Structure formats: structure tokens, C-alpha cells
Amino acid sequence: MPGPITFCKGGGCTAKLGAAVLNRVLERLPKGPPDPDLLIGYDSKDDAAVYRLTDDLAYVQTLDFFPPMVDDPYTFGQIAATNALNDIYAMGGEVRTALNIVCFPESMDLNILGEIMRGGSEKVIEAGGVLAGGHSIADSDVKYGLSVTGVVDPHRMYPNNQGRPGDALILTKRLGVGIICTANRVGEASKEALEAAVASMTTLNKYAAEACRSYTVHACTDVTGFGFLGHLHEMMDGRLSCVIDLDHIPYFPQAAAYADEFLLTAAAQRNRNHVGRFVRFENVPFAMEEVLFDPQTSGGLLIALPREEAGSLLTELKNLGLPAEIVGSITERRDPEILVAGTK
């Protein structure tokens, strides 16, 4: 298998452009006349677009691709595909079709590409979708991902910004995979830490999303490149605030240990620079601040739902083997927008 010098140079969702840069570009794009059937576009910074076809049917569109964050091509293909497919689940949808997106050096062994695409194909099948084609270009570095189309009932879709005061917030996966992958890239991560991170990154959010269908989900997003706090800021939408209980945040202890050793990502610092002014920390160690800003690849769902339903959903998620926790609650708008408080 290729080593880190030729294959894994630092990728996953740490490769995303920073939110501040993207906002400056997107706000200048010509929008054209509004289309009433475009239910969710890029204005709300949501996980995918939703376009209504009929009163009871809309399609969900997303795409995601990035460079490798692990050395094994097959594992990278699984992670990249899982990350793209998860956007459909964050909208409450079901996967239908996927198209491969491939950038690959002509000088590199094509067996590596075959392993990447095999990993991706297996995840599409697990999602219940059909791999229908794709597009490839010669490039100096490896990049892979999917364009995915799903379907959703427009009356039951999950926007990212419709939470309500009093809602509980549930996170379904542990935080810290970006820090662990960074530590692995410089030879500092343990085998156990990397295996745990890979297991998380290759877990589809399909199963968590299916559990949500029996509950009144007001808002949902998947935690990826902008980190837990960045995506939480988007959920608050400038009109809500929240209180986060640090003691109930699911995270990889190894990630906090590596952060204490300053094995950090540039993307996390971009996240801190962009959203830090909206956050106040109380009794939160520096390492845990980094975990909360850490860009996640194929992260979990962050779900807002009525407090009285949260306990039942949490039980279902735990019965699925997910490390889900109720991590906080939404409040009326106040200062700070996001309060993160610990007691330990």
C-alpha cells in the first residue's frame, strides 16, 4: 500500500475552505429569480439542496470529495463515500443514486484507484443506493468523493436552522477524528485511536436517521469540516442561542490527549477564528476547546427535538450501538450565542 508521502498528505474535511472565505464568495454570486420549489439552497448553509417535485416528493442533492486522510485506499474510499452519503441523511432523506468524483495521477498505480472505488461502492450499496456513473480527471493528487441524489417528503425534511427554544440537542458520534488523523500523519497516533476513528468515519448516519423518523425533529445537521461549534453556529441561524454541557460531549479521549500535545489542524484554527466570537467557554480545558473546533470527517448527526422526546430517541440510538448523548439545549436569543460549560 502507498505510504503517507505519496498518498496521505492531509485530507478529509480538514481540506475544506474556511467558512469565512466561502461566505465572502457565496454572498457575491448572482442568484437569479427565486424558485418556489427550491426549498433549501445554499443561503441557509445546509447540508444539501432540496428541490420539490410534487407536493409529497422532493429530491435531495449533495456532493462531497476530498484528499485522503488515511493511508489505506480502500478505507479512504469508504470514508469519503460515507461522508457524502451522510448529507442525505442529515436532511431526513433516503439515498437513491450516486456518481463517483475522481481526481487521480496518471503515474499512480490504478489498483489504488480500484481499491478507493471499491470502498466507495460498498458504502453506496449499504446505503441502499445505486452507483450510476461518475467523472474522472488526471490530477497531481488523489481526490475522491460522490455526488448523491436522494428523496424526501418535503413535509418531513430536516432543515438545519429550524430549532426551537427548549429543544434538546443530541449528537450521535464522538468528536476528535480530525485531531487523531493529524496525529497519525506524523506518526503519533496509537493504532487503537486510529482504528476507533476509522470505525466512526465509516459508520453511515443512515441508522441514526431512521431512528429519528418516529420523532419530531425540528432541525438536523451532520458535523463535518466546520467542527461541532461551527455547525452549531449555523443551526442557531442568528436568532437562537444554546447551552452545551461539556460533561456530556461524546469524544475520543485520545484526541484530547493529542490536542494537549499541540497536534492540531489548521482547519480547526480557521474554525476558531470564524466562530470563536460567538462562543463563551466556562471551565473548559484548552484541549476540549480544540476538540469542539476540530473539523470532523463523516461526523455524526446533531439533532434538535423537543426535550420530552429526547430521552426516548437517545435510548434508541444507544441500542443501535451509537455513542450518542444529549449535549445541550436551545434557548431564546441571548449573549453569548453558544455557552459551553463544564463542571469536571
Image: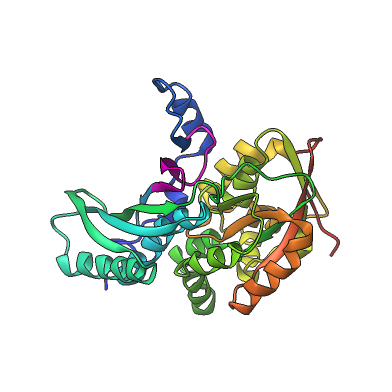
> How many numbered discs, if any?
0
Residue 75 x/y as whole percent: 36, 70
Q: Say above or below: 304 vs 210.
A: above
Q: Is residue 142 visible?
A: no
Left or right side of 50 for 291: right
Instruction: Check the picture and name the quadrant holding the N terminus.
Output: bottom left
Q: Say above or below: 270 vs 215.
A: above
Left or right side of 57 for 4: left
- Confirm whether the magenta stretch covers residue 24: no
Residue furthest right as drawn: 343
Residue 241 x/y as whole percent: 76, 41
Q: Say above or below: 225 vs 263.
A: above
Q: Is 214 in front, or is 265?
A: 214
Residue 110 x/y as whole percent: 15, 65
Q: Is 319 in front, or is 284?
A: 319
Q: Is residue 149 visible?
A: yes
Identified at 58% across, 53% down, the residue is 294
- The residue segment tinted magenta is 42-61
Q: Say above or below: 23 vs 230.
A: above
Identified at 78% across, 44% down, the residue is 165
Left or right side of 240 for 159: left
Residue 88, image quadrant: bottom left
Residue 19 x/y as whole percent: 52, 37
Instruction: Check the picture and name the quadrant holding the C terminus.
Output: bottom right
